[in-house]
Image: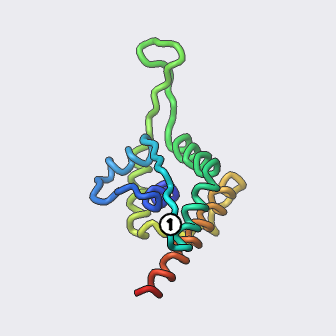
Amino acid sequence: MAIEYIQRLLLGQNLEKKTDYELLRILLRESFSCKVEKRLDKDWQDVLTYLENQKSQREQINSSLISGKQDNYGYCWREAGVKVPFFRTSELLESLTHLRRKRWDISDEIASFEGSQYENIRKYLQGLYSKIETIVKSEKEIR
């Protein structure tokens, strides 16, 4: 969820002043794409290029987020093949509360992600935090 939120902010989506439920709906159910404009600032351009180059990785991680937090149960109104997603809302709200408390920076927790299924997520998130750190440093130097 942290990856999805951070990517959307970096790509320009306004997520401020959203309730927890609104934010969850946006992150899990709404797709977001934008035309990545060329930036004059090299560090910002590096982040946007990183996001663009990792597009398939981003889509795979988003798919993991969605499939990992939902269950599909049976049929809806007896229509064959229709599956209704039921999200584990309480778990998602707990995760959201944790991420907000940490200000979306879980870099200290990345090392504890165990299992090969998290390897791509761990590497991608480390790369993303590294790029953000570079932007923050360069913007502090400008001021």
- In this view, the residue in front, 14 or 41, is 41
Where residue 80 appears, as percent x and y from the top left, is: 52, 13
Residue labelled with disc 1: 39
Q: What residue is drawn where x is 45% and y is 12%?
A: 78
**Does residue 114 appear to the left or right of 21 in the view shown?**
right
**Does residue 25 appear to the left or right of 129 in the view shown?**
left
Image quadrant in which you'd find residue 5: bottom left
Crowdedness near tag 1: few (<14), some (14–19) or many (≥20) residues, C-alpha within 10 Å: few
Where residue 100 appears, as percent x and y from the top left, is: 39, 64
**Does residue 115 appear to the left or right of 143 in the view shown?**
right
Q: Is residue 123 above or below residue 43?
A: above
Q: What residue is drawn where x is 50% and y is 66%?
A: 39
Q: Amino acid at mark 1?
A: Arg
Q: What residue is drawn where x is 35% and y is 57%?
A: 14
Q: Secondary structure at mark 1?
A: loop
Image quadrant containing the C terminus = bottom left
Q: What residue is drawn where x is 66% and y is 63%?
A: 123
- In this view, the residue in front, 112 or 125, is 125
User: Looking at the image, how many numbered discs can be counted on the residues?
Assistant: 1
- In this view, the residue in front, 135 or 99, is 135
